[in-house]
Amino acid sequence: MRAAISACKKCNVNIPIYGMVKNDKHRTRALINTKREEIALSENAMNLITRFQDTVHDTAIEYHRKLRDKEMSKSLLDEIEGIGEKKKELLLKKFGSISKIRDAKITELTTLKGINENLARKIKEKLK
């Protein structure tokens, strides 16, 4: 609640702020206002809040999975100007690994669509 109150003050927004009171299973059992008074809610309202929480949780998990997956698929090829996801995929599909791309001749690299001699030289230089 403190963070929400601080953000609202910073943005000069005056709206009611409520916090969630959790039970021992970390599920929301009630809301509280800034005076720490519990607000009684109907079962339907609590179910709606639970659905909001579940959606936010699922979105956060999915976002962190995407970040992790992106981090895991990084390679030296990502640092070469002119190499995007498609060319990276083509290179790895044809050669199988960074070390085999490193060992490939420039003429072998230029057989791939979109890789000219200049880009092939950049690749070779970066992977030395």
Image: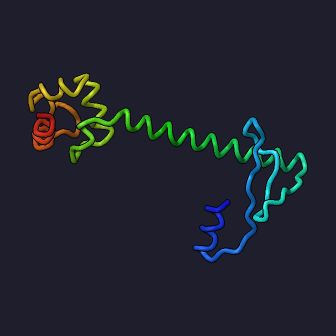
Quadrant, the C terminus: top left
Give the number of marks. 0
Q: Is residue 115 left or right of residue 86?
A: left
- The percent coordinates of residue 113 (x first, y second) are 23, 36
Give 34 or 76, whichever is nearer the viewer. 34
Q: Is residue 37 above or below residue 13?
A: above
- The percent coordinates of residue 16 (x first, y second) are 75, 68
The structure residue drawn at horizontal position 79% and vertical position 65%, both measured from the top left corner, is: 35
Q: Is residue 66 left or right of residue 92?
A: right
- The percent coordinates of residue 106 (x first, y second) are 9, 32
The structure residue drawn at horizontal position 23% and vertical position 37%, both measured from the top left corner, is: 76
Q: Is residue 49 left or right of residue 121?
A: right
Q: Is residue 61 left or right of residue 115?
A: right
Give 39 or 74, whichever is nearer the viewer. 39
Q: Quadrant of residue 12?
A: bottom right
- The percent coordinates of residue 114 (x first, y second) are 22, 40
The structure residue drawn at horizontal position 18% and vertical position 28%, both measured from the top left corner, is: 101
Q: Is residue 81 above or below residue 3?
A: above
Can you name the residue that lies furthest to the bottom here? 12
Quadrant, the N terminus: bottom right
The structure residue drawn at horizontal position 70% and vertical position 45%, both measured from the top left corner, is: 53
Colour pattern of the rendering: rainbow
Q: Quadrant of residue 78?
A: top left
